[in-house]
Every structure is written in C-alpha cells, then in structure tokens.
Amino acid sequence: MHLAVSPNQIMLNRIVAQSGQVVTAKVVDKASQKPISGLPLVASFEKGAGDVFADYKTDDNGLVKILLTKISSRDLEQTVAVKVNLLKFAGDNPSAIYSLVAQKIVVPKDIVIMNVQRPLVLFIFPGKEPGRG
C-alpha cells in the first residue's frame, strides 16, 4: 500500500484553527491503484508539539482529513507523521507483546512539514502614518 499526505508542506500560524489549512491523507493499493477503505491511521507530532486528532479511519475513497488544532512548540519547523495504526487491528485491549511487536514493524507513513510563521506585530504611533518614520 501507498500512503500520501497532501500538501506535504504547509505554512501556518501557531493558531492553526484560524488558518484554514486542510491536510488530507490518501491510502491506495500499490498494485491496483484502488483506494483502501476502513484502514485505521494515526497522526502525531514527530518534531515540535501541539494538538492533533490522533485516530482516523479511511473513507470509501481511501481519504482522511487530518485535524490540527493548535501548535504549542516555538520551533519554526515542525512535523506531523501519519501512519497505519497496527494497534487498532488488535481490538480495544491489545496485549503488551502485540504492542511491542507493532512498534517494531515498519508501516507506510508520510510526513507533513509545517513552517510556523512568527507573529507579526505592528506599532502605530499617534500622529504618524504607518510605514513613515
């Protein structure tokens, strides 16, 4: 299978909810190029920190919409990884051995690189026009 995130690089503010950025992930079968529906995925910050909805399941078109709500790290470049969630195949209470084995298996994954903009502060002094000394 092939997992691809689109767009794979975005520019946004630390207040993500107001940015209007939409990130989607699509999973297709490599051989047939047909979408894979009902596949559990997980999203998490690999570099940086913030709030991202973690658990997803692909729709009939093999798509999910990744929900980022907040960036709490001050790093200018941060990454969110989206990958297949093997623990969901074990049910609600996976055993410790299954969890350990699932962590070691290499699964399809893609990364969203987020370039975080610094806040823009504009000072306006009384009696002066903005931008004029």
Image (cartoon, rainbow, N blue to C red):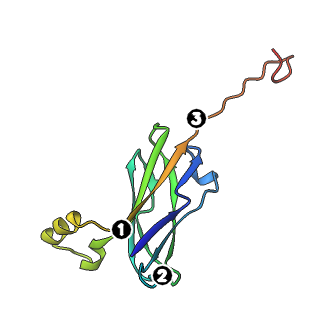
Q: Which residue is drawn at 54% across and 42% down?
A: 116
The disc, 3 or 2, on the residue closer to the chain's N-terminal end is 2
Horizontally, residue 32 falls left or right of residue 127, namely left
Mark-to-mark CA distance, 2 and 1:
15 Å
Question: Circle 1 is placed at which residue position?
Answer: 108
Residue reaching furthest front?
A: 31
Are the residues at dot 2 and dot 1 in contact (C-beta closer than 8 Å)? no
Which mark is on residue 33?
A: 2
Q: Is residue 91 visible?
A: no
Residue reaching furthest top?
A: 133
Q: Residue at x 19, y 68 (%)?
A: 99
Instruction: Tell which of 5 and 17 is nearer to you.
Output: 5
The disc, 2 or 1, on the residue closer to the chain's N-terminal end is 2
Mark-to-mark CA distance, 3 and 2:
40 Å
Question: Circle 3 is placed at which residue position?
Answer: 118
Looking at the rendered structure, the kind of residue marked 3 is Arg
Looking at the rendered structure, the kind of residue marked 1 is Pro
